[in-house]
Every structure is written in structure tokens, then in C-alpha cells.
Image (tube, rainbow, N blue to C red):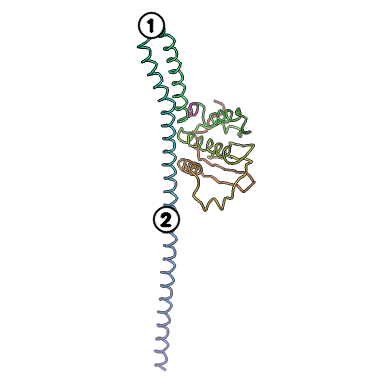
Amino acid sequence: MIDNVYLLIFYGVVLLLILVASFLLFYIRNQNMVWQQKKLLQETQITQQKELLNAVIDSQEVERKRIGQDLHDEIGGTLSAIKLMLNVVKKQKPEDQEDTLLSAKQLIDKMIIDVRHISHDLSPPGLAVFGLYTTIEAFVNLIKNTGEIKIVLDHQENADEVSLPERKSLALFRVLTQLVDNTIKHAQATEIKIYFRLDEHQLLIDYADNGKGFDMAATLNKRAGIGMQNIQSRLQMVNADYRIETNPNAGFRLFISCPIQNEEILDPSL
């Protein structure tokens, strides 16, 4: 009888050890899977951050090259022409100098306009004074006047009165102008619609065109173009969320949700 009791205790202990060992193996395996998933998530996040950083750097380099090219072609060429004219003036008779100096003055006036255009490209002149919506409205009117495409810009009540920090306004302005540029160049669209509205502490911007669209799944498997990378990086820099809806022959749509502070919402009675 006593031997049977010891035998049962022995089997019980063995069974308990097996259960403990199984639990430990299961726990270790589960923890290893969790660790692998965390590692994969971290690697994915690091990869995305690197891609966005590269997109920011690439866009900055593209912008620098464009500005450098503008300065070289427009300002550099004009300065060279003025220099030549001044050298000619030295050799001219006094009665012939007036026409040459007048031409030089006209070139200086042109250069002033060129510099103004380049500086406006760097930071839209009305952005700090009039705000994002009014600046976008002026840009839209310029595009509409070309007759290339129909653009409808509208807003919910008071959504045009949001006063964002310049950094945030500039990022959203660049995103919208990039979207319009992409639509005109690639979408074969006839109409663009842009709608601003407020939702609690969010400025919501709905951008849509009726162009050819594209296969989103196929695009995700490829490296995004520089234009789309610029859009993603600029939105991330101002903590704005976005969602894309598009399909072949079904147009393109981008929803932007940008957080705003209470002080950024103007009092309509002011």
C-alpha cells in the first residue's frame, strides 16, 4: 500500500515536471515570437523612416538644383548682359550712352522681377499674411486661368479662417501644389476638387481628381515616386494623417487630417 502511494507521488511529480517544462517551453516560444514580431516592426519602422528621410533629402536636393538652375539661367545671364552693356558704355560717345543705359536699366528691372519670382517659389508671399486657404485660392486661380483643367475649391464655414503656423501652412501648401502638379502631368484628368473643413481639433482637406487613377496594391510593391515621397514626408513632418483612395480608371483621392490648436482657429467675429 505504501509502495503504491510512493509510486503515485513519483508519477505525480514527474507529471508536474512535464507540465512545468511544457509551460516553460510554450512561454519561451511565445516570448520569442513576440520578440521577433517587435524586431520586425522596429525594422519596418526604421526602413520607413529612412525612406522618408531620403525623400526629404532628395526633395531638398531637387529644390536646390532647381533654384541654382534658375539663378544661373535667369539672374546669371542677366548680370552678364548688364556687365557687357556697361563695358560698351565706357567706349561710347556721351550722346550714344543713353540708349545703352536704358537697356541696362530694363534688364535690371527684369532681374528684380526674376528674383521676386524665385523668392516667391521658396515661400509664397501671401502665406504668412493671408493664410493657407487664401494662398491656395490664389494658386488655384492661376491654374484655372491657363484653361488646362477645371479646379473647384470650396470650404466649410470658418475652415478658411484657420491660422496655422507658417511651417505647417507651407507643408500643406507644398502638398496641395504637388498634388495639382501630379494630376496635370500624369492623371489625364479634366477636373480637380479641393474641400477644406474643420472637425474639432483637425483641419480636414479632401483632394480629388477624375483622372485615370492607378492600382494602389501594385504601387505599394514598388518604390514610390519622388513626388509621392515628398507628399508623405511633408505630411509626416507636421504630424498629419492621410488616406489614399484610387483605382484604375476611377480617379484619385487623398484625405488629409492635420491637427490644429485652439489658438489656430480664428474668432469669426474678429
> Which residue appears at 47% of the width and 30% of the height?
121
Q: Residues within 10 Å of mark 1 (few under 14, many from 20)?
A: few
Q: Which quadrant of the structure image shows residue 205?
A: top right
**Residue 215 x/y as whole percent:** 59, 50
Dots 1, 2 in contact, CB < 8 A:
no
Q: Distance of mark 1 from mark 2, alpha carbons? A: 74 Å
Please provide percent x and percent y for residue 147. Answer: 62, 30
Instruction: Tell me which numbered mark, 1 or 2, is placed earlier along the sequence.
Output: 2
Is the stretch drawn in magenta largely helix, strand or loop? loop
Q: Residue at x 62, y 39 (%)?
A: 189
Please name whichever residue, 210 or 101, is drawn nearer the observer in this view of the structure: 101
Quadrant of the drawing holding the N terminus: bottom left
Occupied quadrant, residue 85: top left
Q: Position of residue 17 (x, y in %)?
A: 40, 79
Q: Amino acid at mark 1?
A: Pro
For residue 127: magenta?
yes
Q: Nearer the viewer, residue 10 or 63?
A: 63
Report the span colored magenta: 124-128
Q: Eyeballing the image, is 60 above or below 127?
A: below
* Residue at which label 1 appears: 94
Find disc 2 in the rendering and name its residue.
43
Q: Amino acid at mark 2?
A: Glu
Total count of labels: 2
Residue at (62%, 42%) from the top-left corner? 211
Horizontal placement of 237 versus 157: left or right? left
Tag 1, which secondary structure?
helix
- Residue placed farthest to the bottom in the image? 1
